Amino acid sequence: MPYVVGLTGGIGSGKSTMGDLFLALGVPVIDADIIARQVVEKGSPLLAELSNHFGTDVLTEQGELNRAKLREIIFSHPDEKAWLNQLLHPAIRNEMLAQVERCLQPYVILMVPLLIENNLTHLCNRILVVDVLPETQIERAIKRDNHKAEIIRNIIASQVSREKRLSYADDIIDNNKPLEQSLEKIKMQINELHQIYLKKAEEKQCQN
Ligand code: ATP
């Protein structure tokens, strides 16, 4: 089992941006968002369970998950949200672990937006937080997703506070500055973290 570095941060904080920089160093990056889509892909047993439970309304004409419809249902029904989470969360966690175990590299990056909210920190040997101010999150997420500020604010409010997230961090990447100014410094920090994680992974290997 490789050493696991959990990479987390709030909406629009820059997790994918940092994940890509680790990927460029040859480090495997396991993305919880991709896995969350894979477990309910067309033809999957979980998608069949969803349509049995909620009705075929949650499927598109092509037989894929109609995410907007599902979001609409669970938004107004907290019980249904709990039912959905108890179905999806174990499947996502198991698939993340399976992908981690398949990696042959000394360490992997496990990129999980809701690592703290969903109590998944125990899957990680170390936690790396990408930190930005809420104003910056809102500004970047609006630019990327074309959402209204209010929607982004609501998502931020549904996630752990910046302070709580930082309290879990072993390492922090400050992503407040525009990349034009900070990219070289961030690449240097990621190179340093890469060396630290390789060393930690080797130490873990020796203990086993
Ligand atoms: P989410 O969890 O919402 O998917 P994320 O944490 O993965 O987001 P990214 O997608 O990496 O965040 O970044 C959000 C947006 O901000 C992207 O459009 C990205 O290109 C941009 N961005 C990231 N870091 C910076 C930066 N330092 N300066 C300017 N733009 C940035």
Image (tube, rainbow, N blue to C red):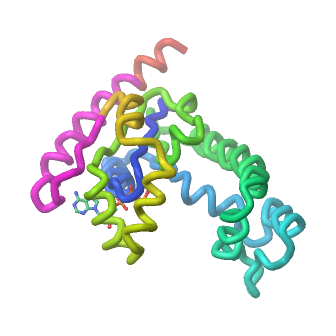
Task: Give the image location of residue 140, x and y in percent.
Answer: 30, 65
Residue 189 position by quadrant: top left
Report the predominant secondary structure element of the magenta stretch.
Answer: helix
Tell me if residue 130 comes above or below residue 43 in the rendering.
Answer: above
Residue 107 position by quadrant: top left
Q: Is residue 179 magenta?
A: yes
Q: Quadrant of ligand 1?
A: bottom left
x 41%, y 74%: residue: 147
Task: Give the image location of residue 157, x and y in percent.
Answer: 46, 52
Task: Give the image location of residue 66, x and y in percent.
Answer: 69, 76
* In the image, farthest residue toward the top: 207
Q: In this rendered view, identify the residue nearer to me: 204 or 140.
A: 140
Q: Is residue 188 left or right of residue 12?
A: left
x 31%, y 73%: residue: 143
Magenta residues span 172-200
Q: Quadrant of the N terminus?
A: top right
* In the image, farthest residue toward the left: 181
Q: In this rendered view, identify the residue nearer to me: 33 or 108.
A: 33
* In the image, farthest residue toward the right: 52
Q: Quadrant of the C terminus?
A: top right
x 58%, y 35%: residue: 119
All told, the count of numbered labels is 0
Q: In this rendered view, identify the residue nearer to me: 191 or 135.
A: 135
Q: Is residue 127 magenta?
A: no
x 16%, y 59%: residue: 178
Residue 131 position by quadrant: top left
Task: Give the image location of residue 101, x and y in percent.
Answer: 60, 37
